[in-house]
Image (spheres, rainbow, N blue to C red):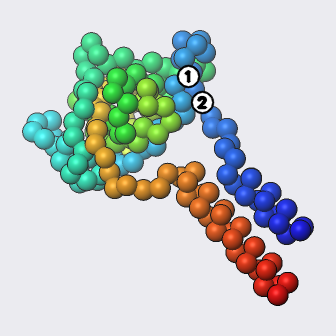
Amino acid sequence: MGTLLKVTGLLAAIILPTSASAYTIDSGSTDVGGLDTLIDHTTLGNSGNGELDWVQSLLGTNYSLGDKYEDGGLTPMLVDGESDIFAHALATSPEYFLIKIGGGNWGGDTHFLYENQNNAAYGVFALNDFTSTCTPTKQSKCNIEINRVSHITAFNGSGVSSIPEPGSIALIGFGLLALGTAKRHRKHA
């Protein structure tokens, strides 16, 4: 019985959600979720389908361009209490979004792909993601401010179907429980 309680306690610790750090804007009135995951970065030309081709090479060809935020539609907001973390409202709740750095004379990569995993209504990113791509010889050109963001593009589609993370943890837990139960039954037989 003690082993069953230990296994049950272990499963509860694994399966129960943990609190993630969430950011807010507008003096705490709007929750924008946590920092989204930077998937990859590169430098692309300014013309053609370079962004779409690059994203499809990473995610698969079933992804397509979604909303594009630029000029008057580009309004990233500094999150409360932070100096380099910004949130941008996303209208279509995309799975991924791309940020392009512009402004000329930039010393790092120009395109950054994020997985929008925390809060589908906002893309949340850190400016230091951009400067981390600067080489030592180009550091003098790597001064980044939010006004260097040229545009944000959403990408919609569906990737390879996979079990969501909580589901896979639950499957592992149930497998451990089954192993423990089988061992217990063998011991008594």
Tag 2 near tag 1, CB within 8 Å: yes
The residue lying furthest to the left in this view is: 48
Identify which amino acid the numbered label 1 is placed on. Answer: Asp
**170 on left or right of 4:** left
**161 on left or right of 118:** left
Residue 132 place in picture, x, y as percent: 43, 43
User: Is residue 142 positioned above or below 8 on the image?
Assistant: above
In the depicted view, which residue is nearer to us: 126 or 176? 176
Q: Classify mark 2: residues with Cα within 10 Å, few (<14), some (14-19) or many (20+).
A: few
Q: Which mark is residue 77?
A: none
Q: Classify mark 1: residues with Cα within 10 Å, few (<14), some (14-19) or many (20+).
A: some
Residue 108 visible from this viewpoint: no
Identify which amino acid the numbered label 2 is placed on. Answer: Ala
The quadrant of the image that shows the N terminus is bottom right
The residue lying furthest to the bottom in this view is: 189
Residue 99 place in picture, x, y as percent: 32, 34
Tag 2 secondary structure: loop
Residue under pointer 2: 22
Residue under pointer 1: 31
Residue 93 place in picture, x, y as percent: 38, 30
Tell me the residue at 31%/19% (across/down): 74
Residue 76 visible from this viewpoint: yes
The quadrant of the image that shows the C terminus is bottom right
User: Is residue 2 positioned above or below 72 on the image?
Assistant: below
Tell me the residue at 49%/20% (across/down): 78
